[in-house]
Image: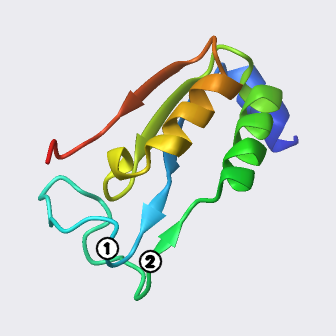
Amino acid sequence: MRLSDFIRNKHFNSIIINISDGPGTCHLRCTYCSLNGFRSEKPVVMTEDNMRLACQYIKWHFGEKAHLHFFGTEPLMFPKLLFLARRLMPDSTITVTTNGV
């Protein structure tokens, strides 16, 4: 069975997108963050092209009304990526985990 068939058959509709990692992408060490201890040594931030590809993949495999959850260091430091996802997936639900700083 292909992964896409498995996803559709199990009715998955939610995906977590980690848009950044490494120094300078978040200065906190929140206890709830699953990335603690797994940070890159240099900053890595998703490009707009990769966000477009991710949204295209999500539409194909999860549908137009997928739930996108942005996580990974501090997503609000990269508003262009969040606005791009909203523009590319207007019917989806978008949520963010943030430390609020």
- In the picture, measured across the screen, residue 26 lies left or right of residue 84, that is left
Q: Say which amino acid is labelled 2.
A: Pro
Q: Residue furthest right?
A: 1
Any mark on residue 24, and which? 1
Q: What is the basis of the colouring in this image?
A: rainbow
Q: Quadrant of the N terminus?
A: top right
Write the residue at 27% across / 64% down. 26
Q: Is residue 72 left or right of residue 9?
A: left
Identify the residue shown where x is 32% and y is 78%. Answer: 23
Dot 2, crowdedness within 10 Å: few (<14), some or many (≥20)?
few
Residue at left 63%, top 15%? 90
In the displayed structure, 13 sits above or below 30; it is above
Name the element at disc 2.
loop
Instruction: Work out whether mark 1 precedes mark 2 in sequence or the reverse, and give the earlier one.
Output: 1
| Residue 75 at x, y percent in the picture | 38, 48
Q: Residues within 10 Å of mark 1 (few under 14, many from 20)?
A: few
Residue 29 placed where, x, y %?
15, 66
The front one of 1 and 8 is 8
Q: Give the CA distance from mark 1 to mark 2.
A: 6 Å
Residue 70 shown left or right of residue 60 in the figure: left
Marker disc for residue 43: 2
Q: Name the amino acid type tagged 1.
A: Gly
Q: Residue furthest front?
A: 80
Q: Residue 54 appears at what percent x and percent y? A: 71, 44
Q: Residue at x 50, y 55 (%)?
A: 19
Asked if the residue under mark 2 is in contact with the one under mark 1, i.e. CB atoms within 8 Å, the reply is yes
> Across the whole image, how many numbered discs are drawn on residues?
2
- For this view, does 13 lie left or right of residue 60? left
